[in-house]
Image: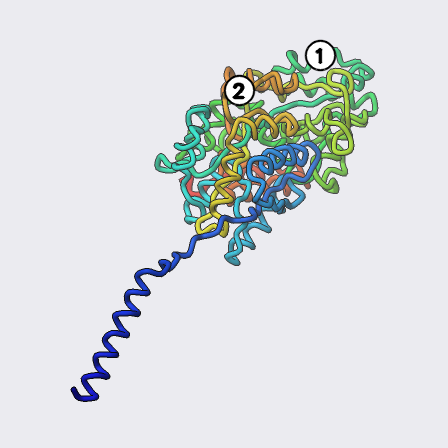
Amino acid sequence: MSSKKVSWGLFSLLIVAILVLSACGPAAKTPVATKSTEVEVFSWWVGPGEADGLAAMVKIFNTEYPGVKFVNAAVTGGAGTNAKAVLATRLAANDAPDSWQAHAGQETIATYVTPGQVKPLDDLFASTGFDKVLPKTLLPLISQNGHPYSVPVNIHRSNVLWYNPKVLSAAGVTANPKTDFKTLDDFFAACEKIKAAGKICLSLGAPWTAIHLFENIMIGTIGADKWNGMWTTPPTTDWAGADVTAGIANFAKALSYTNSDASTMSDWQPASKMMVDGDAAFNIMGDWAYGYFANPAPNGLALKPHVDFDWAVAPGTYGIFNFLSDSFVLPTGAKHPDATIDWLTVAASKAGQEAFNPLKGSICARTDCNQALFSEYSQDAAKDWTSNVVVGSLMHGVVAAPAWSTSIGTAISLFQADTSKTADFQAALVAACKADGTCK
């Protein structure tokens, strides 16, 4: 036998041995994706009531998902206007948080869904049954082409008239705000008495609160159907018509009863505090103010309902529920998608919403929450939500895309500086509608 044949035979045996040993050895492990250890949630909930509500929901999250760190990326100021600016910068830099707060309605659809920045949540809704416990009026507002894109955690009411009973009594106002302000003129008659008594009738805060006031004065002037008609395509309420002109006149008159230093206020809380401190009689603000008034210190004022403050709906809006809803989304290409789903699951859950909303001053987006957990105010609001005519908020993202809403806000700021320019203001509103493409 030649040495070449021996060498080849030994080499062949060596190859076979290696193959046998490889087959008998442990199989190579496929890398397994590790579960996220944190979730960054972006919101503007830093004020009294809202911060308490978020903390309560985070407590539920920490219990359900102890291995996931909750990173609170909240940004303060301006009912979310500051936060939205920061968020836009982060999204442009491809540095999206794991989830962020967005108002249900056109704010979410136009800003995030249309450009493909968030993913649909069909699987989450199906696995949790969340769609089965949402009001029929709400689901279409968080959906596009039948697919839901956000998890609403609450229902807020915009058209709340908060008032100080002691100021009204001292000024000789005998009208009951809960029943007797059927028109704006009824309200203005009370304002005259309060002004004569040396008090501010209607406290106003940072610039965004003027948009909040505008929408509720307009609804109180023209009613639900015509308000809804301002936002249809094309509008069935003429922005250049007499109805809007009347609303602008009432808005100008309402502004005449407000504090002169409104533009210097840091946010809504100082204006609301003017009312409970007795420096003003009324404040038109959303029902998140309830948490600020009634919650214990340090974040709340620990005031007594019906004694230190009371509530009604904004003048002229009896039987109307002007709503908004806070919600959270799943970004496209989320950094921690599994942890984001964990967060959204808690935000959608009965336990999460029951922990959050009583402190926030809102009612659940879900229809199955235990009403016994809620304040007298929230129980009243829950009844109205199921029985009133529902309209959507301008300031809080329901009826208009952000660019259109911003144009309206700019026009309102200019009008505040000179309320005699009603024609210019109305022309600016018409131009804003045309720029949006809604008005042809």
Q: Residue furthest front?
A: 1
Give the labeled residue for mark 1. Answer: 175
Closer to viewer: mark 2 or mark 1: 2
Say left or right for 374 vs 296: left
Q: Secondary structure at mark 1?
A: loop
Mark 1: give few (<14), some (14-19) or many (20+) Cα within 10 Å: some
Give the vertical position of 26 relative to 14 (above or below).
above
Residue shown at 44% from the left, 40% from the top:
109
Question: Which residue is pictured at 66% across the width and 23% down the height?
Answer: 161
At label 2, the amino acid type is Trp
Which image quarter holds the N terminus?
bottom left
Q: Which residue is mark 2?
A: 385
- Dot 2 or dot 1: first in sequence order is 1
Would you say residue 69 is visible in this rendering? yes
- Tell me where residue 129 appears, x and y as whole percent: 42, 28
Label 2 SS? helix
Eyeballing the image, is 1 above or below 374? below
Percent x, y of residue 433: 47, 40
Rendered image quadrant of residue 19: bottom left
Q: Characterize the local packing of mark 2: few (<14), some (14-19) or many (20 or more) Cα atoms within 10 angstroms.
A: many
User: Callout 1, which amino acid?
Assistant: Ala
